[in-house]
């Protein structure tokens, strides 16, 4: 029978009473974090179609092809022919594959043609403005979907993603998105530790995407206005969602992931100091409030010549973490660090590049093992969170989650072709909206 | 009541099947689940007939019967509910007069939730977003998903089991009803003195009566009856728009089409128009003012009470002037007019007043009670508040309508017009 000594009893109670911290910190590698697979298992050939042939699209296609055996890319679609040609050329050089010209489609309806080209899975990598429409079409055609972040530029788009994510789930489809941190081994292990109490209850977070100016493309006489805008899409809110949505979403999604919820409101501001193209801001500062009054401060900036910092910090009742690979106690002493192999030690970007491949490995594995994964809801929530911050900064007013979820805001032209003109180009002025 | 031989057999069979017999349970279960069995003694023949006229009457589908909806799916309390309900049915059949049964009441969503099981709907319709679902359906089902715990499918699909119209949708037909053209008024009424008069809306066949109320310097006219569907539909037809902004076009941006059946299937005509929001009622007054060249408005609470005090002195006087039907609105002419000649100042529908319920509140005062109210609340001083958010709960539109309450079927309004004595020095 039970032979508990008094001492053991005291120890056990102590543990139960809050020292779980020590146990999880102490037992280094013992946690059974599922180690990421190196490659997806083999299976019947999976044929992919790529929609959006820019550099990220081409990158995603290569990552997909590298994810495991019997994976093929058979169709391409883009609104611009030059992008498609470049992508086709790149794939030929990098992967030695030639896409049948019968299955290369150019134009605004190219996406539907790719979906109908006898493919099993779809990669979506266009500017986010187009994502809701493309995702809906892909899911309704029962295709598994990999889609780049973010997934919409306005609340109406987010809602469409949410609906079609449920539809995808009902159809047993797998949906993976480009929020790579969720597929990165070091983040995953850190997450497991935080979840099992390594820093106690989360009380606050900070996240930063402070960096220099991104690229831009100047308009050209031979392009219509819409074409110029699409080619310069990271500078137009209706196409990218603004940079808080387009880039900072990585960190915002991370906060939601670790905290286990989306925020309930946002109060922010931002401005346009140095940007000379498009209609976006170039800096945002937003205070997000989660349940239990947990605050997350988010900062993002695209201006040259300032201090750059892209990182995260989450503080708990017993310590804090950078979310990536290190856990500190409340005094700031390092308690745990993700152990690196020699090879990883040498390559600073090892996990980063690895994650691009990993998300495709995880996706193909889910499809082949018939254990669907569906990241649609989480990416839709992160997108909406970023949009909420943007709107708060544009208006200077507090914005709530419920308002966002029920908003009928839709930006950009409703229906358009390459000759549409008169797209709104006003830069928001805080306090006037 | 004298039980005949056949009925005794039936009751014995039912009792035996439901509680005693575990032997042959399977077979008995199949039979007692079939529509034929339900109807062998059920008093609700009308339910069988209306079921046969519904989308859910599919002859090839033997599995689909009354219990498909009226009992939870097997394994989720199916047998427990069945025994419970079985007893209730037996009891109701033999010990209560079926004429007493208020079937209409059981058709209302509040009650229907008790005898129609969401889990059963989901058993056959596990997908909320089938590929062919219409855009309306997408918004609606998304809304349902957000409020899954407090909503039931039949909040929107009330008619799935009985009769036509199982698909919920916008009620656009409402706005296309043909306009009567037998009478066409050319001008609105002229007011010369403080005498009751009939208002006529120019270029329409719509007229209504206004009763004079003497009150010294602040005399006024009050609608003889609550604003009717005939009157309200004219407003909708003339102003209908998809616009949703409150201050869009000079004064009255039009109402959006309602979600579902605003008349609750009770009929329109001279019945009071219902389910419009306070905002919509105010816009109606503005529109009518422009159409008639007068200044119609909602009554103040003080005006309403002033009239009410003359109408009742004791509760017993109300007996013939209020509706006895506790399930729905009735036409005003079905009751006798009160001492001032008004219909339904009390009962039928609660009436909006212009006043806020409390200073600074977004809710407004409602007076007079409705068909649902307790008799004791038919008093001049009894006041209730609108419950805006609660009454919008199931509206799945985004943003929610500013014109229609989705979840309140007993509010309407009565018009008031200030008397301007032009002969005064």
Image (spheres, coloured by chain):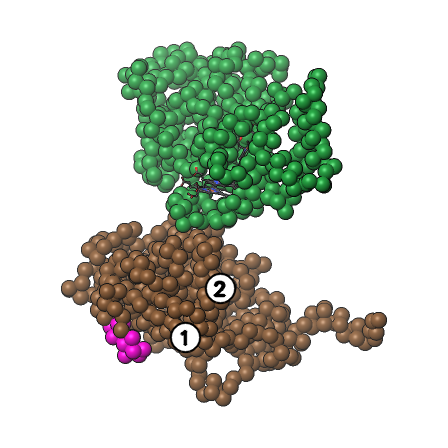
Chain colours: A brown, B green
User: Is B341 drawn above or below residue A347 in the view shown?
Assistant: above
In percent of width and height, residue A81 lies at 21, 66
Residues shaded magenta:
A86-97
Per the image, label 2 sits on a secondary structure element best described as loop
Q: Position of residue B217 (x, y in %)?
A: 45, 17
The residue to which callout 1 is attached is A69
Residue A349 falls left or right of residue B92: left
**Can residue A180 be seen in the rendering of this structure?**
no
> Residue A126 versus residue A46: which sits nearer the camera?
A46
Residue A13's tag is none
- Which badge, 2 or 1, comes first in the chain's sequence? 1
Residue at image location 57% in from the left, 13% down from the top: B320
> Which image quadrant is residue A141 in?
bottom left
Give the residue pinned by disc 2.
A370
Q: Position of residue A218 (x, y in %)?
A: 22, 68
- Quarter of the rendering containing residue A390: bottom left
Name the foreground residue: B361 vs B20.
B20
**Residue at image coords 37%, 33%:** B172
Is residue A96 within the magenta segment? yes
């Amino acid at each position: 029978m039970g032979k508990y000594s008094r001492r053991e009893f005291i120890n056990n109670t102590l543990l139960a009473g809050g020292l779980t911290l020590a146990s999880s910190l102490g037992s280094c590698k013992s946690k059974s974090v599922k180690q990421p697979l190196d490659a997806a298992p083999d299976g019947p050939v999976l044929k992919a179609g790529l929609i959006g042939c820019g550099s990220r699209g081409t990158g995603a296609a290569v990552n997909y092809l590298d994810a495991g055996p019997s994976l093929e890319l058979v169709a391409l679609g883009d609104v611009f022919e030059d992008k498609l040609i470049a992508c086709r050329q790149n794939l030929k050089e990098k992967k030695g594959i030639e896409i049948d010209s019968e299955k290369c489609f150019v134009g605004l309806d190219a996406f539907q043609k790719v979906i109908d080209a006898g493919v099993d899975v779809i990669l979506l990598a266009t500017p986010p403005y187009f994502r809701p429409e493309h995702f809906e079409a892909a899911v309704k055609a029962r295709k598994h979907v990999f889609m780049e972040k973010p997934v919409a530029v306005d609340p109406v788009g987010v809602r469409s993603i949410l609906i079609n994510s449920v539809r995808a789930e009902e159809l047993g489809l797998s949906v993976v998105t480009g929020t790579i941190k969720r597929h990165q081994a070091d983040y995953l292990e850190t997450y497991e530790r935080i979840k099992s109490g390594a820093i106690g209850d989360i009380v606050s977070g900070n996240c930063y995407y402070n960096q220099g100016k991104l690229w831009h493309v100047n308009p050209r006489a031979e392009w219509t206005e819409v074409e110029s805008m699409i080619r310069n899409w990271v500078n137009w809110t209706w196409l990218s969602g603004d940079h808080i949505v387009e880039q900072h979403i990585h960190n915002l999604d991370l906060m939601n992931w670790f905290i286990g919820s989306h925020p309930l409101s946002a109060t922010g501001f931002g401005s346009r100091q140095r940007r000379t193209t498009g209609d976006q801001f170039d800096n945002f500062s937003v205070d997000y409030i989660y349940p239990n009054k947990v605050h997350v401060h988010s900062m993002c900036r695209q201006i040259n010549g300032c201090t750059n910092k892209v990182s995260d910090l989450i503080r708990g009742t017993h310590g804090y973490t950078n979310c990536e690979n290190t856990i500190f106690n409340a005094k700031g002493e390092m308690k745990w660090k993700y152990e690196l192999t020699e090879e990883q030690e040498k390559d600073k970007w090892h996990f980063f590049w690895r994650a691009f491949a990993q998300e495709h490995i995880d996706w193909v594995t889910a499809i082949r093992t018939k254990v669907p994964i569906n990241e649609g809801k989480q990416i839709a929530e992160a997108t909406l969170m970023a949009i909420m911050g943007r709107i708060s900064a544009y208006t200077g007013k507090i914005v709530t989650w419920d308002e966002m979820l029920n908003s009928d805001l839709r930006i950009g032209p409703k229906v358009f072709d390459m000759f549409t003109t008169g797209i709104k180009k006003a830069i928001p002025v805080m306090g006037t909206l | 009541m004298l039980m005949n031989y056949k009925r005794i057999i039936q009751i014995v069979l039912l009792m035996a099947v439901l509680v005693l017999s575990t032997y042959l349970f399977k077979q008995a279960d199949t039979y007692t689940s079939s529509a034929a069995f339900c109807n062998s003694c059920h008093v609700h023949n009308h339910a069988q007939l209306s079921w046969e006229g519904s989308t859910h009457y599919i002859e090839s589908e033997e599995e689909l019967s009354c219990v498909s909806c009226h009992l939870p799916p097997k394994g989720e309390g199916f047998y427990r509910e069945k025994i419970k309900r079985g007893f209730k049915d037996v009891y109701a059949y033999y010990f209560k007069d079926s004429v007493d049964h208020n079937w209409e009441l059981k058709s209302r969503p509040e009650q229907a939730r008790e005898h129609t099981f969401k889990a059963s709907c989901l058993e056959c319709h596990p997908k909320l977003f089938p590929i062919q679902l219409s855009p309306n359906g997408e918004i609606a089902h998304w809304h349902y998903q957000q409020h899954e715990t407090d909503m039931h499918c039949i909040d929107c699909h009330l008619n799935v089991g009985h009769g036509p119209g199982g698909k919920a949708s916008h009620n656009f037909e409402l706005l296309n009803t043909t306009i009567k053209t037998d009478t066409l008024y050319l001008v609105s009424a002229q007011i010369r003195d403080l005498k009751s008069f009939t208002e006529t809306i120019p270029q329409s066949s719509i007229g209504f009566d206004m009763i004079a109320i003497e009150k010294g310097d602040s005399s006024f006219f009050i609608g003889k009856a609550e604003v009717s569907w005939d009157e309200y539909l004219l407003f909708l037809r003339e102003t209908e728009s998809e616009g949703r902004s409150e201050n869009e076009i000079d004064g009255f941006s039009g109402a959006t089409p309602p979600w579902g059946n605003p008349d609750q299937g009770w009929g329109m005509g001279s019945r009071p128009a219902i389910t419009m929001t306070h905002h919509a009622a105010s816009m109606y007054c503005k529109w009518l003012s422009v159409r008639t060249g007068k200044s119609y408005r909602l009554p103040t609470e003080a005006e309403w009470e002033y009239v009410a005090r003359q109408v009742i002195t004791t509760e017993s006087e109300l007996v013939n002037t209020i509706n006895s039907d506790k399930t729905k609105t009735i036409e005003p002419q079905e009751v006798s007019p009160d001492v001032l000649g008004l219909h339904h100042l009390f009962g039928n529908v609660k009436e909006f007043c212009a006043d806020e319920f409390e200073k600074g509140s977004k809710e407004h005062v409602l007076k007079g009670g409705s068909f649902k109210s307790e008799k004791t609340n038919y008093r001049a001083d009894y006041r209730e508040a609108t419950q805006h958010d609660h009454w919008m709960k199931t509206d799945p539109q985004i943003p929610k309508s500013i014109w229609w309450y989705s979840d309140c079927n007993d509010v309407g309004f009565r018009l008031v017009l200030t008397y301007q004595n032009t002969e005064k020095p």
